[in-house]
């Protein structure tokens, strides 16, 4: 009985937090944030690792959902998904998988990140919290995992500039958090061990974009702006080079990738 009461109190608290969060959102956010519709039974959403090797597939059911992990198209496991499904992410080594912990699912608000191992077993929950330690909701638009699974970056839309937050997977603590370029977050990528983080941002209604590169402390060490570069047809805007010496940004006009090298770091 105590557990039921505690759950009811937790749900009521989350509802109040969510309501306050919505009231505090910029007036231009709701227009861009359509209410989430129920997913049709039988629909499958797929999410791939940055290297394209691993695929997390979530299939929506009538009462329960299911999910699976594939490596190069070969299914390794298939489980019932008892929690609510959401946008998944998987590391390049297939050992870390994430799902959102929903707080207000209809509007896309989540209360944290659920972390699973490569067998689909729950490992930990990373809860979103305010500076005073209280629970909070975040409207996560993009999520990225370091190739070896050591850290997780999330991107959120904000009024003046997007917000990027880096979490340590083992402790669940925030490593760094910083404003990033323009208000809309369109892509986030993390290099090995969180050494670098790439973000692609844009301004709603203009198509203008700003790309940023952050170091392991969350300090912006490079940025570049491009006008009229945004398109819904583009699924990836930033990526790291395989040689580990730089990265690429996508140019819409030429429909090609543009290479950039890491800037020299001050010691």
Image (spheres, rainbow, N blue to C red):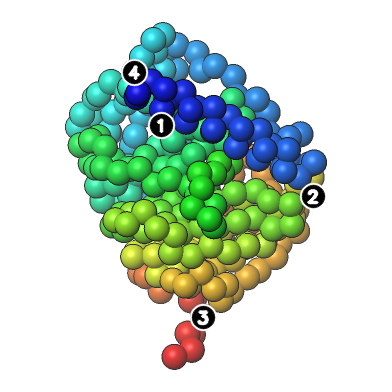
Which picture quadrant has residue 125?
top left
- In this picture, residue 234 sits left or right of residue 82: right
Say if residue 118 shows up in the picture: yes
- Note whether 78 is above or below 27 in the view shown: above
Q: Nearer the viewer, mark 4 or mark 2?
A: 4
Q: Residue at x 45, y 11 (%)?
A: 41
Q: Are marks 4 and 3 in contact (CB under 8 Å)?
A: no
Q: CA distance from mark 3 to mark 2?
A: 29 Å
Q: Are marks 3 and 2 in contact (CB under 8 Å)?
A: no
Q: Give the mark nearer the N terminus: 1 vs 4.
A: 4
Residue count near mark 1 (Cα–Cα under 10 Å), binned few <14, some 14–19, many ≥20: some
Q: Which residue is mark 3?
A: 263
Q: Which mark is residue 162?
A: none
Q: Quadrant of the N terminus?
A: top left
Q: Give the mark nearer the N terminus: 3 vs 2.
A: 2
Q: Give the mark nearer the N terminus: 4 vs 2.
A: 4
Q: Which mark is residue 206?
A: 2
Q: Residue at x 40, y 37 (%)?
A: 99
């Amino acid at each position: 009985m105590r557990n039921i009461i505690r759950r009811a109190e937790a749900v009521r608290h989350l509802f109040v937090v969510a309501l306050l969060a919505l009231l505090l959102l910029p007036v231009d956010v709701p227009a861009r944030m359509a209410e989430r519709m129920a997913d049709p039974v039988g629909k499958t959403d797929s999410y791939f690792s940055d290297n394209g090797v691993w695929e997390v597939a979530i299939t929506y059911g009538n009462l329960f959902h299911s999910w699976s992990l594939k490596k190069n198209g070969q299914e390794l496991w298939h489980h019932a998904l008892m929690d609510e499904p959401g946008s998944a992410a998987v590391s390049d080594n297939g050992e870390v998988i994430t799902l959102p912990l929903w707080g207000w699912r209809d509007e896309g608000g989540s209360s944290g990140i659920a972390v699973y191992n490569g067998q689909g077993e729950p490992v930990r929950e990373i809860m979103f919290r305010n500076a005073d330690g209280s629970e909070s909701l975040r409207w996560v638009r993009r999520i990225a995992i370091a190739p070896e699974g050591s850290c997780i970056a999330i991107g959120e839309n904000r009024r003046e500039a997007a917000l990027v937050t880096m979490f340590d997977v083992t402790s669940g603590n925030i490593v760094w958090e910083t404003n990033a370029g323009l208000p809309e977050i369109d892509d986030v990528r993390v290099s090995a061990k969180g050494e670098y983080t790439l973000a692609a941002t844009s301004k709603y209604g203009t198509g203008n974009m700003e790309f940023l590169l952050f170091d392991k402390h969350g300090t912006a060490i490079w940025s570049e702006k491009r006008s009229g570069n945004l398109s819904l047809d583009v699924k990836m805007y930033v990526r790291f080079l395989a040689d580990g010496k730089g990265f690429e940004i996508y140019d819409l006009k030429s429909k090609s990738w543009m290479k950039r090298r890491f800037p020299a770091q001050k010691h």
